[in-house]
Amino acid sequence: MSINRLTYKLPNELHAAVNASLEDWRSNNKVARLWQKDASLWSDTDEGRWLGWLTVADEQFLNLATFKQLAAEVKKTKFKHVLLLGMGGSSLCPEVLRMTFGKVAGFPELHVLDSTDPVQIKTLEKKLDLKKTLCIVSSKSGSTLEPNIFKQYFFERVKKAVGEKLVGSRFIAVTDPGSKMQQVAESDQFWKIFAGVPSIGGRYSALSNFGMVPAAAMGMDLGKFLKNTREMSKACGAGTTPDKNPGVLLGTILGVAANHGRDKITIITSPGIFDLGAWLEQLIAESTGKIGKGIIPVDRENLAKPETYGNDRVFAYLTLAGKTNKAQDAAVAALEKAGQPVIRITLPNTYTLGQEFFRWEIATAVAGSIIGIDAFNQPDVEASKIETRKLTSEYEAKGSLPPESPFFTSKEAKLFADPKNTAALSGGKSLAEVLKSHLSRIGPGDYFAVLGYIPMNAENQAALQSIRISVRDSKKVATCLGFGPRFLHSTGQAYKGGPNSGVFLQITCDDASDLPVPGQKYTFGIVKAAQARGDFAVLAERGRRALRVHLGKNLKSGLKALAKAVNQAL
C-alpha cells in the first residue's frame, strides 16, 4: 500500500499537546467512533447525517463503468469544451482538476464558471464554441442562485447556437435526488442527470459525482485516480491508531494548534498542484469557522523571511515529488529552522491528488472535533444568501436596489460602511487617510482580507496581491484574498462566523458592461452588487471591522490609485 508521505516538525510545547490529544483519541476509541458516525464527537446534533463522504471513494470505484461510459460518449460526440456551472463545493474540485491535469488528448477542455461578474462571464463565453460545448450544471440543493442563473443564461446561448431540438442534449445536471434542478433538467430534457449523495455536504463532495462527473468528461483516468484514493481511505480507517492514521494525525495537529492560538494555516503548494490551496481554503474555513472559533486558511500568500510571521500560524507545504520550487524549499526550510510548525506532504504524482482530498476531509472533521464545533454546517453562508435574496427580490419588485450613500467621496473612490464602522473611520481628508484609520485597526494575531467583487483575472489578481503583501509586510499579520461571489461559498463562512480577528477591505466597481439574466428583471451586474452588499451587511451585523471601497468603470486606474493609497496609509 502506498500513500502520500506526511512529516512534521513542531515546537516542543505544541508537540507535547498533539501527543496528549492523540492519546485521548486512542483511549476514547474516537477513530472508530468517527467511522461509526458518532455525532457526540462534535456538537452531538445532526453530524451523523453528514458523513457519507467516508465511504464514497469505494462506492465510486464500484461505479467506474458509468464514468467510463460517459467519457466514451463525450469523446465520440467530439465536444471541444466542457463548461462546469457551479459554486463552492460544486466548482472548486473541478477547478483543481482542470488546473492540475490540463487538457487531456482526445477530450474536450474543461472550463469552470463560478462568478456572477458580467465581464468575467463574457470573457469565458468568448473562449467557447457553443455549438461544441457540453454544459454541466452542478448544484447540490438545486436552489442555489448562481448555478440557476448560469443555466438560464447558457441554455439560451446554446439554444441560439444549436436550435431548440438539440439544446437539452448539450446539458448534464449533477444534483441531489428530487431537487429543483432535477425537475428543471427533466423538463428541459437534459442529456444526463447524475445524483448527488444527500449525506455529503458540498465541501466534502470532491470524490462524489460533483467532482468525478467533470473528471470523466475531461478524460481523466478515474480507475487510476480512485484506486490511489482508496489507499488513503484504507490508511485512515477505523482500525488504524491515531498516531499512524494520516488523516487523524494531520487533523490533530491542526485542531490542537488552533486551540493554542495558531489558528491560521498557511498553504504552500508546488507549481504543478498550486490550485489545491483554493479547494483546501473552502474545506477548512467553511468547516471550522463558526461560533467565534475556527482556522483561517491563508492561500497564495508568497513566502517571506521568518521574522515577518507571528506565532499564530501553522505552515503546510504540499509538493509534487521531483517538481519542487527551489525558492519555496529554501523559504520553508528557513521557517522550520526559526521554530515555526511545518507540515510537509509529498505527492509522488498528480494521480495521487485524490488521497489529499480524502486525507484533508478526515483531518478537517477531526480538527473540528478538537476545536469543539459542528464541522458540517455553514450558518453564516446562509445568512449572506438571505441578505442577497432580499436585495434581488426588491430589484424584481421595484426595478432598483435600495439607495445607499457613501460616507466619503474622492476622485478615486467612494467609501461605504455601516454606522459603527463609519464612526470609527470618519474624519480622514483623503482616501489614504481613511485607509490609514482602517488599517491601524489591525493588531497582533489579526488577519487582513481583501474581498474583490471584480473580474477574477491575472491582472486583477496581481493588483490585489500587491495590496495584501504590502499589508502583510507592514503589519506582520496573515492576509487573505478572495474574489466575490465565489468566496461567499468558501472562506466567507469563517470571515463572518469564525474568530473576530479579521479586518476586511471589500472592493466593488462599476461594471464595464452588463449581461441580462433570461427570465428575470435583474442582470448579472445587479446580482453581483446585491451579493457584495449582502456580504457587507452580514460582516457589519457580526461586528466585523470592514470598509467597502467602490471604484469607477476604469478598474485598472482605480486599482492603481487604491494600491497607491494603501502604500501611503502604511
Image (spheres, helix red, strand yellow):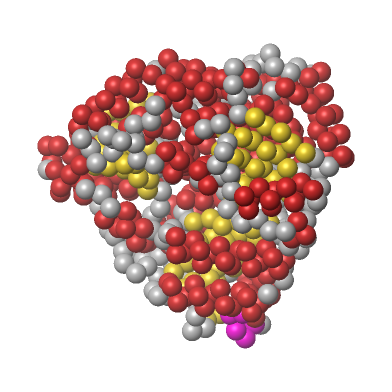
Image height of 94 relative to 468, above or below: above
Q: Which of 343 and 484 is in front in this view?
A: 343
Q: Residue at x 83, y 39 (%)?
A: 14
Asked if residue 263 shows in the view, the reply is no
* Magenta range: 428-432
Q: The C terminus is located in which quarter?
A: bottom right
Residue 64 in the image, given as x and y percentages of width and height: 38, 19
Instruction: Report whether 537 appears left or right of 344.
Output: left
Q: In this rendering, does residue 384 appear at all?
A: yes
Q: Which residue is drawn at 27% across and 28% down?
A: 192
Q: In which quarter of the image is residue 196?
A: top left
Residue at left offset 62%, top offset 64%: 469
Q: Which residue is rendered at x = 18% and y = 39% of the image?
A: 167
Residue 473 percent across, percent down from the top left: 69, 65
Q: How many labels does the image show?
A: 0
Query: Which image quadrant: the N terminus?
Result: top right
Residue 221 belongs to magenta span: no
Is residue 430 inside the magenta stretch? yes
Between residues 566 and 416, which one lies in front from this camera angle? 566
Q: Nearer the viewer, residue 208 or 388?
A: 208
Q: Is 187 on the left or on the right of 141, as rendered?
A: left
Residue at the bottom extreme? 429
Give the image quarter of residue 465: bottom right
What secondary structure is the stretch in magenta mostly built from?
loop
> At which x and y percent is residue 6?
67, 32
Q: In which quarter of the image is residue 216?
A: top left
Considering only vertical position in the picture, is 328 above or below 515? above
Q: Viewed as shown, does residue 150 lie left or right of 339?
A: left
User: How far from the left and from the top, in percent, is residue 53?
Assistant: 53, 25
